[in-house]
Image (cartoon, rainbow, N blue to C red):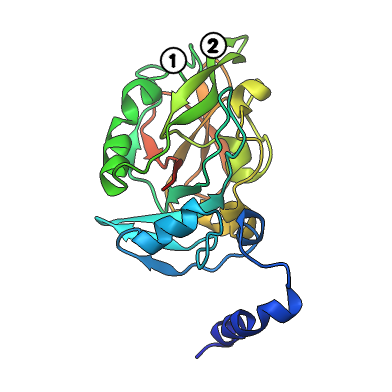
Amino acid sequence: MSLGVIAYDELQQHKGLFLPHGVDGAGFHNSIYRGKFLGNEVTSEQWDRIADGTFRDMYIGDYWKINGTTYLIAAFNYYYNTGDSLLRENHITLVPAGRLYKHRMNPGNTTEGGYVGSDMYTTGLSQAKSTIHADFPGHVITHRRYLSNAVADGQASAVAWFDSDVELMNEVMAFGSVVSGKGGRYNIGTEKSQLPLFALRPDLLNIGAAWWLRDVYSAISFARVSSYGFADVYPASNILGVRPVFSISA
């Protein structure tokens, strides 16, 4: 048995002595990376722990492997109290461990219309949505996100509220800050802080293949995570990985 496992077991036995106010809830669970396999489906007990907001025995980096796709827990209650219609459901935000497939942002090298105007948004996420809804039937949250829908002078220039279930991540979610994206809040929206998964394990950004982010960089390019592990941009017509973000609730 490894020292890490022993330490974790001892924490469970004695945590009440050191943390008398309890250790369950989004704040505590967002602060610990564990990386444990949770099963090939979300169990009824796990749904109960999501519903009551304790998230008991679920931590950042824990994962389900469903129909061949590994889904990593990236955050707990990341979107809570966001949206022009506030999200008040306890939820877990997930990302695939790798890309689901490859697709372009647009047929040509343009960012006209912002993220919402892109081919990725209108049709390119359809396969991801189909897979994710099949793997978590009836549990994928549709909530309100603030997404760019116009570009001027090579940067995102307008934003609006949209019903949203499965989307590309932005740079802030991945890197913890804006790196290349131009347009400020129009690229960022409600997703204004780094996902705990990538704060605690930044190496998990690096999957050995490039994948798209939704931030507008210029009149022709969107942001991406490169296959070499650095923050980058690429012309919109290129075929890169699709690694979306979504949330589930009971």
200 displayed left or right of 60: right
Secondary structure of the residue carrying numbered label 2: strand
Q: Nearer the viewer, residue 49 or 145?
A: 49
| 37 to 54, vertically: above or below | below
Identify residue type, mark 1: Gly
| Furthest residue toward bottom | 1
Q: Is residue 131 visible?
A: yes
Residue drawn at point x = 40 percent, y = 25 percent: 105
Horizontal and vertical percent for residue 123? 31, 23
Which residue shows up at 58% across the image and 82% down it?
4
Q: Position of residue 158 (x, y in %)?
A: 60, 12
Q: Is residue 3 above or below residue 36?
A: below
Which one is in front, 227 or 189? Answer: 189
Q: Residue at x 31, y 41 (%)?
A: 138
Q: In the image, residue 12 lies at what x, y percent?
A: 59, 80
Relative depth, front residue between 191 and 48: 48
Local crowd size for mark 2, using a 10 Å CA cut-off: few (<14), some (14–19), many (≥20): many
Residue where numbered disc 1 is placed: 117
- CB atoms at circles 2 and 1 under 8 Å apart? yes
Mark 2 or mark 1, earlier in chain: 1
- Quarter where residue 190 is shown: top right
Q: Secondary structure at mark 1?
A: loop
**Residue 150 got which mark?**
2
State the image coordinates of residue 128 (x, y, percent, origin top left): 32, 38
The answer to whether residue 206 is visible is no
Determine whether, in the image, residue 129 is placed left or right of residue 220. Answer: left
Residue 164 occupies which quadrant of the picture? top left
How far apart, in angstroms, are the residues tagged by discs 2 and 1? 8 Å
Circle 1 Cα neighbour tier, 10 Å, few/some/many (<14 / 14–19 / ≥20): some
Image quarter of residue 41? bottom left
**Which residue type does callout 2 highlight?**
Ala
